[in-house]
Image (tube, grey):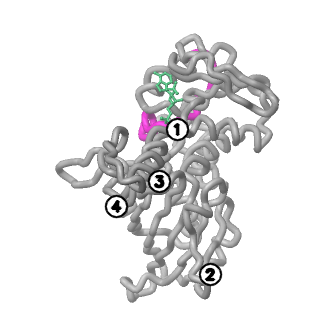
Amino acid sequence: MSKVVAIVGATGAVGVEFLKCLDERKFPLKELRLLASARSAGREMQFKNQTLKVTELTERSFDGVDIALFSAGSGISKKFAPAAVKAGAVVVDNSSAFRMDAGVPLVVPEINPEAIKTHKGVIANPNCSAIISITPLWPIHKVNPIRRLNIATYQAASGAGAAAMEELVDSTRAYLDGRDYQPKVLPHPYAFNLFSHNADVDPVTGYNGEEAKVIDETRKIFGVPDLRISITCVRVPVLRAHAVAVSFECERPITPEEVRAILAKAPGVRIVDDRAKNYFPMPKDASGQDDILVGRIRQDLGDPTGHTIALLSAGDQLLKGAALNAVQIAELL
Ligand code: A2P
Protein backbone atom coordinates (compact mmCIF):
# COMPACT_ATOMS: atom_id res chain seq x y z
CA MET A 1 0.00 0.00 0.00
CA SER A 2 1.32 3.45 -0.89
CA LYS A 3 2.51 5.64 1.98
CA VAL A 4 2.65 9.32 2.83
CA VAL A 5 6.32 9.95 3.62
CA ALA A 6 7.82 13.09 5.18
CA ILE A 7 11.55 13.88 5.06
CA VAL A 8 12.75 16.05 7.92
CA GLY A 9 16.01 17.71 6.85
CA ALA A 10 15.26 17.24 3.14
CA THR A 11 17.80 19.88 2.10
CA GLY A 12 20.72 18.30 4.02
CA ALA A 13 23.41 15.89 2.85
CA VAL A 14 21.40 12.84 3.98
CA GLY A 15 18.04 14.38 3.06
CA VAL A 16 18.99 14.62 -0.61
CA GLU A 17 20.01 10.94 -0.54
CA PHE A 18 16.62 10.00 0.99
CA LEU A 19 14.97 11.40 -2.15
CA LYS A 20 17.33 9.46 -4.42
CA CYS A 21 16.86 6.18 -2.51
CA LEU A 22 13.06 6.48 -2.49
CA ASP A 23 13.15 7.07 -6.24
CA GLU A 24 15.71 4.39 -7.16
CA ARG A 25 14.08 1.75 -4.96
CA LYS A 26 10.60 2.66 -6.28
CA PHE A 27 9.24 3.15 -2.79
CA PRO A 28 5.40 3.09 -2.97
CA LEU A 29 4.57 6.75 -2.33
CA LYS A 30 1.17 8.36 -2.04
CA GLU A 31 2.75 11.70 -1.17
CA LEU A 32 6.25 12.99 -0.37
CA ARG A 33 6.53 15.95 2.01
CA LEU A 34 9.85 17.83 2.22
CA LEU A 35 10.55 19.60 5.50
CA ALA A 36 13.48 21.76 6.60
CA SER A 37 14.13 24.97 8.50
CA ALA A 38 12.42 28.29 7.77
CA ARG A 39 15.57 29.23 5.81
CA SER A 40 14.67 26.68 3.13
CA ALA A 41 10.89 27.20 3.01
CA GLY A 42 9.79 27.62 -0.59
CA ARG A 43 12.94 26.08 -2.04
CA GLU A 44 12.19 23.73 -4.93
CA MET A 45 13.61 20.19 -5.18
CA GLN A 46 13.26 17.65 -7.97
CA PHE A 47 11.78 14.22 -7.32
CA LYS A 48 11.29 12.01 -10.38
CA ASN A 49 9.70 14.41 -12.87
CA GLN A 50 8.02 16.54 -10.21
CA THR A 51 9.10 19.77 -8.60
CA LEU A 52 8.37 19.71 -4.87
CA LYS A 53 8.41 22.71 -2.53
CA VAL A 54 10.17 22.52 0.83
CA THR A 55 8.03 23.65 3.76
CA GLU A 56 9.05 24.74 7.22
CA LEU A 57 9.07 21.98 9.85
CA THR A 58 6.46 22.60 12.55
CA GLU A 59 4.56 20.36 14.95
CA ARG A 60 1.67 20.40 12.48
CA SER A 61 3.78 19.06 9.60
CA PHE A 62 2.84 15.42 10.22
CA ASP A 63 -0.94 15.27 9.72
CA GLY A 64 -1.66 12.21 7.56
CA VAL A 65 2.00 11.12 7.44
CA ASP A 66 2.64 7.34 7.63
CA ILE A 67 6.46 7.38 7.78
CA ALA A 68 8.72 10.28 8.79
CA LEU A 69 12.41 10.00 7.89
CA PHE A 70 14.36 12.33 10.20
CA SER A 71 17.88 13.60 9.50
CA ALA A 72 18.19 17.11 10.91
CA GLY A 73 20.25 16.43 14.02
CA SER A 74 19.45 15.17 17.51
CA GLY A 75 17.92 18.39 18.81
CA ILE A 76 15.32 18.48 16.02
CA SER A 77 14.54 14.77 16.47
CA LYS A 78 13.99 15.19 20.20
CA LYS A 79 11.79 18.22 19.64
CA PHE A 80 9.67 17.01 16.71
CA ALA A 81 9.60 13.17 16.75
CA PRO A 82 6.98 13.13 19.55
CA ALA A 83 4.66 15.30 17.40
CA ALA A 84 5.15 12.96 14.45
CA VAL A 85 4.35 9.88 16.55
CA LYS A 86 1.32 11.63 18.08
CA ALA A 87 0.05 12.31 14.56
CA GLY A 88 0.26 8.57 13.84
CA ALA A 89 3.53 8.43 11.88
CA VAL A 90 6.33 5.93 12.41
CA VAL A 91 9.61 7.86 12.78
CA VAL A 92 12.82 6.42 11.32
CA ASP A 93 15.42 8.61 12.98
CA ASN A 94 18.93 9.01 11.63
CA SER A 95 20.15 10.99 14.65
CA SER A 96 21.58 9.63 17.89
CA ALA A 97 18.65 11.02 19.93
CA PHE A 98 16.87 7.74 20.71
CA ARG A 99 19.33 5.03 19.68
CA MET A 100 20.17 3.81 23.15
CA ASP A 101 16.60 4.11 24.57
CA ALA A 102 15.53 0.68 25.77
CA GLY A 103 12.15 0.85 24.01
CA VAL A 104 13.57 1.98 20.66
CA PRO A 105 14.75 -0.65 18.16
CA LEU A 106 18.14 0.12 16.59
CA VAL A 107 18.12 -1.61 13.25
CA VAL A 108 20.41 -2.73 10.45
CA PRO A 109 18.06 -4.69 8.16
CA GLU A 110 20.79 -7.23 7.28
CA ILE A 111 21.36 -7.90 11.01
CA ASN A 112 18.28 -7.51 13.20
CA PRO A 113 15.18 -6.83 11.04
CA GLU A 114 12.96 -8.60 13.58
CA ALA A 115 13.66 -5.83 16.13
CA ILE A 116 11.42 -3.51 14.09
CA LYS A 117 8.32 -5.33 15.35
CA THR A 118 8.88 -4.00 18.87
CA HIS A 119 8.72 -0.31 17.91
CA LYS A 120 6.43 2.10 19.71
CA GLY A 121 6.54 4.80 17.06
CA VAL A 122 10.30 5.40 16.73
CA ILE A 123 12.94 3.24 15.05
CA ALA A 124 16.55 4.41 15.23
CA ASN A 125 19.02 4.25 12.37
CA PRO A 126 22.49 3.43 13.76
CA ASN A 127 25.67 5.49 13.61
CA CYS A 128 27.28 5.37 10.15
CA SER A 129 30.61 3.95 11.35
CA ALA A 130 28.77 1.27 13.30
CA ILE A 131 26.72 0.22 10.25
CA ILE A 132 29.74 0.15 7.95
CA SER A 133 31.91 -1.73 10.48
CA ILE A 134 29.44 -4.39 11.58
CA THR A 135 27.23 -5.25 8.60
CA PRO A 136 29.98 -7.49 7.12
CA LEU A 137 30.75 -8.96 10.56
CA TRP A 138 27.27 -10.23 11.41
CA PRO A 139 27.23 -13.24 9.04
CA ILE A 140 30.63 -14.26 10.46
CA HIS A 141 29.38 -13.78 14.04
CA LYS A 142 26.44 -16.10 13.33
CA VAL A 143 28.82 -18.91 12.26
CA ASN A 144 31.66 -18.32 14.73
CA PRO A 145 30.75 -15.82 17.48
CA ILE A 146 32.93 -12.70 17.67
CA ARG A 147 34.42 -12.18 21.13
CA ARG A 148 36.51 -9.06 20.58
CA LEU A 149 36.67 -6.22 18.06
CA ASN A 150 39.37 -3.67 17.33
CA ILE A 151 38.37 -0.92 14.88
CA ALA A 152 40.11 2.10 13.32
CA THR A 153 37.95 4.42 11.20
CA TYR A 154 38.86 6.74 8.35
CA GLN A 155 35.76 8.96 8.26
CA ALA A 156 34.53 11.21 5.47
CA ALA A 157 33.31 14.81 5.73
CA SER A 158 29.67 13.90 4.94
CA GLY A 159 29.10 12.58 8.46
CA ALA A 160 29.37 16.16 9.67
CA GLY A 161 26.81 17.36 7.11
CA ALA A 162 26.68 19.26 3.84
CA ALA A 163 28.55 22.26 5.30
CA ALA A 164 31.53 20.06 6.25
CA MET A 165 31.67 18.64 2.70
CA GLU A 166 31.74 22.19 1.39
CA GLU A 167 34.48 23.07 3.89
CA LEU A 168 36.63 20.19 2.60
CA VAL A 169 36.28 21.42 -1.00
CA ASP A 170 36.75 25.11 -0.19
CA SER A 171 39.73 24.58 2.14
CA THR A 172 41.42 22.29 -0.40
CA ARG A 173 40.97 24.94 -3.10
CA ALA A 174 42.34 27.63 -0.76
CA TYR A 175 45.34 25.43 0.12
CA LEU A 176 46.16 24.85 -3.56
CA ASP A 177 45.79 28.56 -4.29
CA GLY A 178 48.08 29.39 -1.35
CA ARG A 179 45.28 31.28 0.45
CA ASP A 180 44.57 31.21 4.20
CA TYR A 181 41.41 29.34 5.24
CA GLN A 182 39.76 29.52 8.67
CA PRO A 183 37.77 26.33 9.44
CA LYS A 184 34.12 27.13 10.26
CA VAL A 185 32.47 23.73 10.65
CA LEU A 186 35.22 21.37 11.78
CA PRO A 187 37.73 22.23 14.49
CA HIS A 188 40.95 21.74 12.51
CA PRO A 189 42.34 22.39 9.01
CA TYR A 190 40.92 19.63 6.79
CA ALA A 191 42.83 19.98 3.50
CA PHE A 192 45.78 17.55 3.29
CA ASN A 193 45.31 16.70 6.96
CA LEU A 194 43.50 14.26 9.24
CA PHE A 195 42.46 14.56 12.86
CA SER A 196 40.93 12.61 15.72
CA HIS A 197 37.11 12.64 15.31
CA ASN A 198 35.58 15.99 16.26
CA ALA A 199 33.08 14.54 18.79
CA ASP A 200 33.76 15.55 22.41
CA VAL A 201 36.25 13.42 24.33
CA ASP A 202 35.30 11.88 27.68
CA PRO A 203 37.99 13.20 30.05
CA VAL A 204 37.90 10.00 32.11
CA THR A 205 37.92 7.24 29.46
CA GLY A 206 39.71 9.21 26.72
CA TYR A 207 37.19 7.90 24.15
CA ASN A 208 35.29 10.43 22.01
CA GLY A 209 31.53 10.47 21.46
CA GLU A 210 31.74 8.80 18.05
CA GLU A 211 33.75 5.92 19.49
CA ALA A 212 31.29 5.52 22.37
CA LYS A 213 28.41 5.36 19.87
CA VAL A 214 30.02 2.55 17.87
CA ILE A 215 30.74 0.56 21.03
CA ASP A 216 27.28 0.99 22.60
CA GLU A 217 25.34 0.58 19.38
CA THR A 218 27.24 -2.51 18.22
CA ARG A 219 26.51 -4.20 21.53
CA LYS A 220 22.80 -3.32 21.24
CA ILE A 221 22.43 -4.38 17.59
CA PHE A 222 24.33 -7.66 18.09
CA GLY A 223 22.52 -8.29 21.38
CA VAL A 224 25.86 -8.87 23.14
CA PRO A 225 25.98 -6.30 25.99
CA ASP A 226 29.52 -7.17 27.06
CA LEU A 227 31.14 -7.46 23.61
CA ARG A 228 34.78 -6.33 23.97
CA ILE A 229 35.44 -3.43 21.59
CA SER A 230 38.28 -0.97 21.14
CA ILE A 231 38.04 1.79 18.54
CA THR A 232 39.82 4.89 17.25
CA CYS A 233 37.79 7.26 15.04
CA VAL A 234 39.62 9.63 12.70
CA ARG A 235 38.31 12.20 10.23
CA VAL A 236 40.10 12.04 6.85
CA PRO A 237 39.81 14.42 3.87
CA VAL A 238 37.37 12.29 1.86
CA LEU A 239 33.93 13.52 0.79
CA ARG A 240 31.36 10.79 1.41
CA ALA A 241 32.58 7.25 2.13
CA HIS A 242 34.08 5.91 5.32
CA ALA A 243 36.77 3.22 5.47
CA VAL A 244 37.26 1.02 8.54
CA ALA A 245 40.12 -1.31 9.47
CA VAL A 246 38.74 -4.08 11.65
CA SER A 247 40.38 -6.90 13.55
CA PHE A 248 38.02 -9.43 15.18
CA GLU A 249 38.63 -12.41 17.39
CA CYS A 250 36.24 -15.37 17.18
CA GLU A 251 35.26 -18.06 19.65
CA ARG A 252 36.91 -20.78 17.51
CA PRO A 253 39.88 -20.61 15.11
CA ILE A 254 38.94 -19.07 11.74
CA THR A 255 40.70 -18.68 8.37
CA PRO A 256 40.55 -15.95 5.70
CA GLU A 257 39.13 -18.58 3.29
CA GLU A 258 36.20 -19.25 5.64
CA VAL A 259 35.57 -15.51 5.98
CA ARG A 260 35.66 -15.05 2.20
CA ALA A 261 33.20 -17.92 1.70
CA ILE A 262 30.79 -16.42 4.26
CA LEU A 263 31.05 -12.88 2.86
CA ALA A 264 30.60 -14.06 -0.74
CA LYS A 265 26.99 -14.92 0.18
CA ALA A 266 26.36 -12.03 2.59
CA PRO A 267 23.67 -9.44 1.74
CA GLY A 268 24.81 -5.81 1.36
CA VAL A 269 28.47 -6.78 1.07
CA ARG A 270 30.86 -7.08 -1.91
CA ILE A 271 34.34 -8.56 -1.71
CA VAL A 272 37.10 -6.40 -3.27
CA ASP A 273 40.27 -8.27 -2.39
CA ASP A 274 42.86 -8.46 -5.19
CA ARG A 275 46.27 -9.03 -3.64
CA ALA A 276 48.08 -9.32 -6.99
CA LYS A 277 46.87 -5.90 -8.13
CA ASN A 278 46.98 -4.42 -4.59
CA TYR A 279 43.33 -3.45 -5.17
CA PHE A 280 41.22 -3.21 -2.05
CA PRO A 281 38.20 -1.21 -0.79
CA MET A 282 38.52 2.52 -1.36
CA PRO A 283 36.15 5.42 -0.58
CA LYS A 284 36.33 6.39 -4.27
CA ASP A 285 34.83 3.01 -5.26
CA ALA A 286 32.37 2.85 -2.35
CA SER A 287 30.88 6.31 -3.08
CA GLY A 288 27.45 6.03 -4.62
CA GLN A 289 27.33 2.25 -4.01
CA ASP A 290 24.75 0.47 -1.85
CA ASP A 291 27.11 -2.38 -0.92
CA ILE A 292 29.87 -2.23 1.67
CA LEU A 293 33.17 -3.22 0.05
CA VAL A 294 35.32 -5.64 2.05
CA GLY A 295 38.91 -6.76 1.41
CA ARG A 296 42.41 -7.23 2.81
CA ILE A 297 40.94 -10.32 4.48
CA ARG A 298 43.85 -11.94 6.26
CA GLN A 299 44.88 -13.74 9.41
CA ASP A 300 45.70 -11.23 12.16
CA LEU A 301 49.33 -12.03 12.93
CA GLY A 302 48.93 -10.45 16.36
CA ASP A 303 47.05 -13.56 17.43
CA PRO A 304 49.12 -16.72 16.87
CA THR A 305 46.19 -18.91 18.04
CA GLY A 306 44.39 -18.33 14.70
CA HIS A 307 41.18 -16.94 16.23
CA THR A 308 41.58 -13.43 14.75
CA ILE A 309 41.03 -11.96 11.27
CA ALA A 310 41.93 -8.48 9.99
CA LEU A 311 40.12 -6.73 7.14
CA LEU A 312 39.47 -3.34 5.53
CA SER A 313 35.99 -2.15 4.51
CA ALA A 314 34.61 0.95 2.80
CA GLY A 315 30.99 2.08 2.62
CA ASP A 316 29.09 5.14 1.46
CA GLN A 317 28.38 7.15 4.60
CA LEU A 318 25.34 8.87 3.08
CA LEU A 319 23.83 5.64 1.66
CA LYS A 320 24.32 2.47 3.73
CA GLY A 321 25.64 4.64 6.59
CA ALA A 322 22.46 6.76 6.62
CA ALA A 323 19.73 7.20 3.96
CA LEU A 324 19.75 3.72 2.42
CA ASN A 325 19.63 1.94 5.79
CA ALA A 326 16.68 4.16 6.83
CA VAL A 327 14.80 3.54 3.57
CA GLN A 328 15.41 -0.22 3.96
CA ILE A 329 13.79 0.09 7.42
CA ALA A 330 10.87 1.97 5.86
CA GLU A 331 10.51 -0.84 3.30
CA LEU A 332 10.30 -3.40 6.11
CA LEU A 333 7.57 -1.29 7.72
P1 A2P B 1 18.15 23.82 6.22
O1 A2P B 1 18.82 23.47 4.92
O2 A2P B 1 16.90 24.59 6.03
O3 A2P B 1 19.10 24.43 7.22
P2 A2P B 1 23.17 18.61 7.16
O4 A2P B 1 23.23 17.38 8.05
O5 A2P B 1 23.65 18.33 5.79
O6 A2P B 1 23.84 19.78 7.81
O7 A2P B 1 21.63 18.98 7.03
C1 A2P B 1 20.82 19.33 8.11
C2 A2P B 1 19.36 19.36 7.71
O8 A2P B 1 18.60 19.69 8.86
C3 A2P B 1 19.02 20.40 6.67
O9 A2P B 1 18.01 19.92 5.83
C4 A2P B 1 18.53 21.56 7.52
O10 A2P B 1 17.65 22.42 6.86
C5 A2P B 1 17.76 20.80 8.57
N1 A2P B 1 17.57 21.65 9.74
C6 A2P B 1 18.50 22.29 10.47
N2 A2P B 1 17.91 23.03 11.43
C7 A2P B 1 16.57 22.85 11.31
C8 A2P B 1 15.42 23.35 11.99
N3 A2P B 1 15.52 24.19 13.03
N4 A2P B 1 14.19 22.93 11.57
C9 A2P B 1 14.08 22.10 10.53
N5 A2P B 1 15.13 21.59 9.84
C10 A2P B 1 16.36 21.97 10.22
Q: Is residue 301 above or below residue 324?
A: below
Frontmost residue, 174 versus 281: 174
Residue at x-position 72% and y-position 30%: 46
Q: In which quarter of the view is residue 257 placed?
A: bottom right
Q: Residue 267: x and y, percent?
A: 68, 61
As measured in the structure, the alpha-carbon distance from the residue carrying label 3 to the one carrying label 4 is: 14 Å
Q: Which class describes the residues within 10 Å of circle 3: few (<14), some (14-19), or many (20+)?
A: many
The amino acid type, in three-letter code, at marker 2 is Asp
Q: Which class describes the residues within 10 Å of circle 1: few (<14), some (14-19), or many (20+)?
A: many
Q: Is residue 291 left or right of residue 280?
A: right
Q: Which residue is mark 2?
A: 274
Q: Which residue is mark 4?
A: 232
Q: Earlier in the sequence, mark 1 or mark 3?
A: 1
Q: Which residue is mark 1?
A: 94
Q: Residue 294: x and y, percent?
A: 58, 69
The amino acid type, in three-letter code, at marker 3 is Ala
Q: In which quarter of the view is residue 194 placed?
A: bottom left
Q: Which mark is residue 156?
A: 3
Q: Earlier in the sequence, mark 2 or mark 4?
A: 4
Q: Residue 51: x and y, percent?
A: 75, 24
Q: Is mark 1 within 8 Å of ligand 1?
A: no
Residue 85 visible in this rendered orientation of the protein: no
